Amino acid sequence: MTKLFFALLLIAGSITAQAGNPENGTPYKVKTDESAIAWTGHKVTGQHNGTIAIKDGSLNINDGILSGGSFTIDMTTISALDQQGEGKTKLEGHLKSDDFFGVATYPTSTLKITKATAKGNGQYNITADLTIKGITNPVTFDASVKTVSNQVTATADIKVDRTLYNVRYGSGKFFDNLGDKAIYDEFDLNIKLVATSK
């Protein structure tokens, strides 16, 4: 009886470890041509918005449940959709400069899922490590994941505090008397990933 009890404990512990392992499951490769990130930055006088391309990535699915994954963001593709002509060129150049994301030095950012908690009906609470400009911080957000045949579609909205990644330009935390030139610290990312089994 005692041996059976300990055997059950070992089995239960093994199952728990596998369920919590973000690398567990079947890898689904992200289709970069169907996946994208939309960004919105806010300032006192309004906002700007645009897109960033996804370079590569994968999602892990275990018995139909998201168990982990990661993807790489190509920061050199930052684009502004609310501007045209010279204004567009100037804004995109500024975002890529060292004032903001310094893409010459840091051409990519990454997000790696460390924990995925299923809430039912394809809804998840996600904890992940987000790396921007070589600095990694944890982020927590809700995500929706839909699996049909061999394809997975995942969507999520994430708020990011840029100052945690040494992006301080126009931040009231670090500069005084900015007035209407102040840029809010948080920006929004709307992420859509489409992935298929390898």
Image (spheres, grey):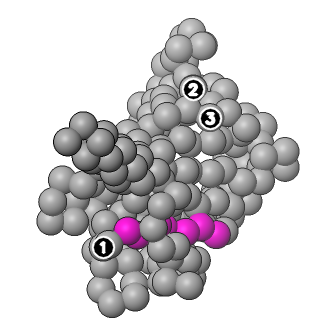
Report, in whole angstroms, how far the alpha carbon at label 1 lies from the one at label 3.
Answer: 29 Å
Majority secondary structure of the magenta segment? strand
Span of residues in magenta: 56-62
Horizontal side of residue 102 vs 66, given as left or right: right
- Residue at the spot x=66%, y=50% of the render? 109
**Residue closest to the far bottom:** 149
Residue type at mark 3?
A: Thr
Residue type at mark 1?
A: Gly
Label 1 SS:
loop
Which of the two labelled residues, at mark 1 and mark 3, occupies the earlier sequence position? 1
Which of the two labelled residues, at mark 2 and mark 1, occupies the earlier sequence position? 1
- Location of residue 120 in the rendering, given as x and y in whole percent from the top left corner: 15, 60
In this orientation, does residue 29 appear? yes
* The C terminus: image quadrant: bottom right
Answer above or below: position of 17 versus 44.
below
Which of the two labelled residues, at mark 2 and mark 3, occupies the earlier sequence position? 3
**Residue closest to the far left:** 121
- Location of residue 83 in the rendering, given as x and y in whole percent from the top left corner: 55, 61
> Total label count?
3
- Mark 2 Cα-neighbour bin, 10 Å: few <14, some 14–19, many ≥20: some
Question: Where residue 163 is drawn, which disc sits there?
Answer: 2
Give the labeled residue for mark 1.
64
Report, in whole angstroms, how far the alpha carbon at label 2 lies from the one at label 3.
Answer: 12 Å
Give the labeled residue for mark 3.
136
Horizontal side of residue 28 vs 151, given as left or right: right
